[in-house]
Amino acid sequence: MVVSARAGVISAVDCGLARVRARIVECLRPIAVREFPVADAVGATLAIALTTGTPLPRVDSAAMDGYAVAGPGPWWRLHPQVRYAGRACSVVLAPGEAVRIATGAATPLGTTATLRDEHTVTTTVSGKPVVMRAPDAPVRDDTRRQGEHWDSGTELAAAGTRVSVALASAALSAEAETVTVRGPVRADVVMTGDEIRAVGPLGVGETRDSLGPVLPEFLRRCDIESTGLWHLADGQDLLRSWLALRSHADLVVMVGATGRGAADHLRALLTELGAHVVIDRIAIRPGGSTLVAQLPDGRVLLGLPGNPLAAVAALLAIGPAVVDALTRRTPGPTMWGRLSDAGVLAGEATRIVPVQQQAGGVWRSTGPAHTPHLAGLIGCQALAVLPPGTGRGTLVELLPLPH
């Protein structure tokens, strides 16, 4: 591995994405902890473990429509009321009595079991209804007991867990209206370049901004929320002025200006501002000019190459690690797949290529992808990370694409 003169900065010849991601997690400072409504916290990371506030169920309740019964049966007295979920009912059962009950309703005092409808038969004796267990029915109790799923104070998820839709739903079931989290990570998105035009007819030498409008979808795939999109012409003064603006975002995602050409001023500006550069380049193709820095005000700058495919490849490769670092998230599992057609790769750089899943579960590359546009992603479900030496049949990391 070759390391630049600035301590800790990883250069283009690196030992792989794992080292880059580890460096990001090690060096970036986490964002502040806050209380957040559960419904709005999806994509954030738990800063404190999620524990239950009440047992579930809170009381004994019916798991199925049927009868709450007392004693072994038959049940000679059927109460005329029906126990409904969420409604009060004054019925108290004595041995030999039953009452109709709906799914989710609390069982009345005296209940020894709940029988589902298909396990019972009713008949009439002396003009009165009698409930009996069906002759071929199993002897079972369809009562959900208090605390059957969890008791009060049970840990449902540890600190560092991503708040998924399932976790948010479970938190509400556990009577937790808010959670203590870091995130969701918010990012200001900046597209740079004199030649980039967002609206209006193209002039000589101009190109359409085909990435900015869709970049929020790729950011969301990394659990990053876009706060807005800005277009800046090339020039160090413009970049300096923009970075000086106060922002409540945690992250600046800057597309372009990360190279070392005549129009690329970002690296010089970061040195001038006293930013701490964590990643200077990455040994990937496309996307090698990517950089990560922490600005003096605490915001993180993720600099992506200007070509759309290179920007997307770099973002999906290290964006999740930036989120892990900022939120102190426990990294999730890596997605893997086996390639059906990769040739052995020469050179020291890791290649990132679009792939499609084939029948049987193997993955196939769609051929050379051109960096100035995203047409090569059409019909693809992921990008494959191909380290040097990758060959046919190799198990490789997959970076899922947005749907």
Image (cartoon, rainbow, N blue to C red):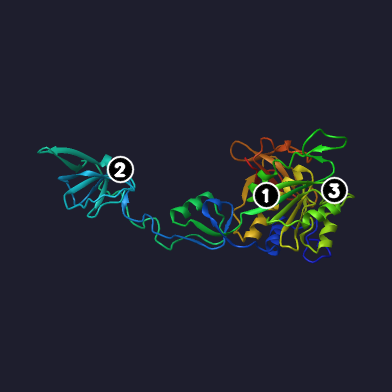
Using the rendered view, name the quadrant where residue 275 is placed.
bottom right
Q: Nearer the viewer, mark 2 or mark 1?
A: 1
Which residue is farthest left? Answer: 126
Q: Nearer the viewer, residue 266 or 240?
A: 240
Q: Which mark is residue 234?
A: 3
Q: Which mark is residue 65?
A: 2
Residue 180, position in %: x, y? 54, 60
Residue 290, position in %: x, y? 77, 52
Placement of 244 over or under 218, stated as above or below: below
Residue 380, position in %: x, y? 66, 38
Image side of residue 391 versus residue 77, left or right:
right
Residue bearing mark 1: 227
Instruction: Please report the residue visible at 52 percent of the width from the left and 62 percent of the height from the top.
Output: 49
Image side of residue 118 versus residue 380, left or right:
left
Q: Nearer the viewer, mark 2 or mark 3?
A: 3
Quadrant in which the C terminus appears = top right
Label 1: element kind = strand
Instruction: Please report the residue visible at 61 percent of the width from the left and 56 percent of the height from the top.
Output: 183
Which residue is farthest right? Answer: 262
Label 3: element kind = loop
C-beta proximity under 8 Å, tags 2 and 1: no
Instruction: Please report the residue visible at 57 percent of the width from the left and 62 percent of the height from the top.
Output: 47
